[in-house]
Image (spheres, rainbow, N blue to C red):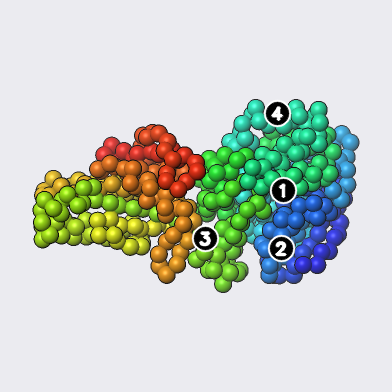
Amino acid sequence: MDRDVRYCTTEDGVRIAYCVEGDGALTILALPALNETFSLDHLMPVYPQFYRDLGAGRRVVRFDWRGTGLSAALPAGVPLEAAPLRDMEAVARATAESCVIWAPTITGPAAIEFAVAHPDLVSHLILYDTFATPDDAIPQNLRSGFNTLARANWQMAAQTIADSNGRREFPEEAAQLGDWYYRSEAGEGYLARTQTLRNSDAHALLAQVRVPTLVLHRIADPIILFAAGQILAAGIPDARFVPLEGKGHLFCLGDYGNILSAVDGFLGDRAEKAAVHTRESAFRTVLFTDIVGHAEMMQRLGDAKGRDVLRAHERITRDLLKQFGGTEVKTMGDGFMASFGSVTSAMDCAIALQRAFAAHSEKGEPLQVRVGLNAGEPIEEDGDLFGATVILASRIAARAGPGEILVPDTVRGLLSGKGFVFGDRGEFVPKGFDEGVRLWDVRWRESA
């Protein structure tokens, strides 16, 4: 896309540099994640590539915060508290009647305040891996450590911040990002900005957000705690929450197709692209059931009576899948594989299954079933599901005992605050996986 660099002036007289890419009907105002300047995009090629993909068929407006890149220096003695909103308002009014706000990483509080203060300028709000206040998301000792290092050696601090995005998984990009941060702003500006952020708290504003809001958060984000995204989604009326798989923190690291899919589905302006992305990387909860001691039961009861028990398992499972919005992927004779669009519905269904099996066992032949769940982005092909998400769900189900429901730590996190009761079952390393997985059993007998 051709880049058009322009300037606008804030209400307190600061000149802000911005660029416009694309010519679509919908405008996305992309907030700088930290202090990076679009004038140094060549230092981090995957970053502008993300915006080219996000902006295909749209207009993407990017700008430099005051004191960074091509924008004017920080005015002496002027506090920064109101600066983000003034910078955003100046650029928004200069570029579109109404725009989508893309607010990544530490920009959440400012974006939320802006959406509440200027609903006329905001059509949609997208919050990516961010928070209402840094206290929800980043440990105080980590923030203090970054600031202490920045005072002593800004170049080293910039690289350390970049490395925390995912140095092990993305060593080349982390090195590029550190250089970009360092060259975009002086250390004094970074310290002033983070000092302002320390006092930011948008909790009281969440209920006042009236624009359609999408909350995206990587489950394994190494910087911003996943719970911070849950707090945003719970506090903003009618917010759409999409947990994401993926490594690293910054949106442009790794495969970001799931981000584009979620945004396309939310905005609804690229329906064909959204449908393609959804088929390729829809977030789902996968559920496995398995009858415990199936072979022994068939030998003991014989084919006819054994088949009666299997039919009862099939009837109960299919009835409850229908009731809770699950999709039967396939049956393996003594078990089922199913998927859900909602992790809460999947857990409600799992609990209902175990209760139904227990009630059936009280009246006749015992029907003891193990259940395992996992959430992620399986690969879909011809109505079947494949990939690591599915394999791990199967491995987890195999660890369960009769009448048990087991879930990994990620699913437990997604269900936080939903009223489910969990017991820690420790960690195991699933066959075919390099890292251990902490398991939790769901106390369905005690849960309401």
Residue 430 in picture, x, y percent from top left: 42, 44
**Mark carried by residue 281:** 3
Q: Earlier in the sequence, mark 1 or mark 2?
A: 2
- In three-dimensional space, the C-alpha distance between marks 2 and 4, rounded to whole angstroms, equals 34 Å
Question: Given the image, on which type of amino acid does mark 4 rest?
Answer: Gly
Label 4: how many residues lie within 10 Å, few (<14), some (14-19) or many (20+)?
A: few
Between the C-alphas of marks 1 and 2, the distance is 21 Å
- Res. 260 image quadrant: bottom right
Q: Earlier in the sequence, mark 3 or mark 4?
A: 4
| Secondary element type, mark 3 | helix
Residue in the image at 67% along x and 53% along y: 252
- Asked if marks 3 and 4 touch (Cβ < 8 Å), the reply is no
Q: Amino acid at mark 2?
A: Arg
Q: Which residue is mark 1?
A: 172
For the residues labelled 3 and 2, say whether their Cβ atoms are less than 8 Å apart.
no
Give the mark nearer the N terminus: 3 vs 2: 2
Crowdedness near tag 2: few (<14), some (14–19) or many (≥20) residues, C-alpha within 10 Å: some
Q: Mark 3 and mark 2: span between their CA atoms?
A: 20 Å
Q: Is residue 189 above or below residue 240?
A: above
Q: In the depicted view, which residue is nearer to us: 111 or 42? A: 42
